[in-house]
Amino acid sequence: MLPLLLSTIQNDDDRAFLLNLYTEYYALARNAISQVTHGGQDTDDLVEDTFLKLIEKISLLRALDCCKTAAYVVYTAKSIAINFIRHRDVCQKHGYYGGQKDISEEMADAEDPRGDTYLRMEKIEALSDAVLKLPERQKDLLHFKYTLDMSDSEIAEKLSISPDSVREYLTRARRAIKKLMEKEGD
C-alpha cells in the first residue's frame, strides 16, 4: 500500500517526507489503532487510512517537532479507528432493516384461499419500505419502542430527551409512516 500512498503525491520532497513519516510512525499508528479496535482484522487498512489522511497535513507536520508529530499521528489514528467503529456499529444496529423474505413458500402452505396472508405480507413490506425512508432519529425511536420494547423513559434516557418528547416524536414518526404509505398507495 505504501507505493500507492506515495504515488498520490506529486512533490518529491513531500514523497520523501511521507516515506520517512511512514517508516518512523507506522508502529505507533498501528498500536494506537489496535488499542481502539482491540486488534481487529481491519487494523492494517486503518493504518493506511491514517497515512492517507496525513498526506493532506504534510505542511503542518513539517512544522512540528518530533513529539508533537507523534502526538498528531496518534490522535489521527485513534480518530480514524473511532470513526470506523462508529460506522460499523451503526451498520450493525440497522442491519434488521430491509430484510426480505420469500413468501412464496408461506403462500403455498397457507390455508386461507382468499389471500389474506398475502395482503398482510404486502402491508408489512409497505410498512418496512416506509420505515426505511424515515430520518435516522425516527427509525431509532421506532426500533427502540417496537422492536426492543423499551419504555418511553428508557428511550428518553438513551437519547437524552424527556419522556414527553419521546411520545411526541413517536407520534410524528407514526404519522410520517402513515403519510408515506398513503402516498405509495396512490
Image (tube, grey):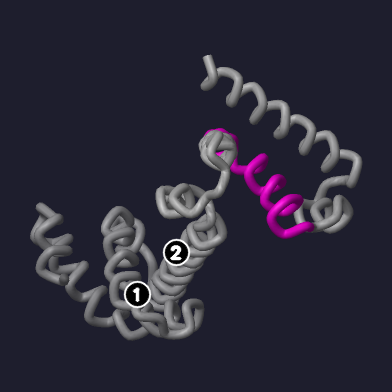
Residue sitting at 88 percent across and 45 percent down? 162
Q: Are marks 2 and 1 in contact (CB under 8 Å)?
A: yes
Residue 18 appears in which quarter of the rendering? bottom left
Residue 20 appears in which quarter of the rendering? bottom left
Q: Given the image, on which type of amino acid does mark 2 rest?
A: Phe
48 left or right of 144? left
Residue 54 in the image, given as x and y percentages of width and height: 32, 61
Residue sitting at 40 percent across and 76 percent down? 70
Label 1 sits on residue: 42
173 falls in the magenta region = no
Residue 145 in the image, given as x and y percentages of width and height: 76, 51
Q: Given the image, on which type of amino acid does mark 1 rest?
A: Asp
Asked if 71 appears above or below 172 in the picture, the reply is below
Write the start and end of the magenta stretch as one range. Answer: 130-149
131 falls in the magenta region = yes
Residue 182 appears in which quarter of the rendering? top right
Upstream in sequence: badge 2 or badge 1: 1
Q: Nearer the viewer, residue 8 or 181?
A: 181
Mark 2 neighbour class, 10 Å CA radius: few under 14, some 14 to 19, many 20 or more: some
Q: CA distance from mark 2 to mark 1?
A: 9 Å
Label 2 sits on residue: 84
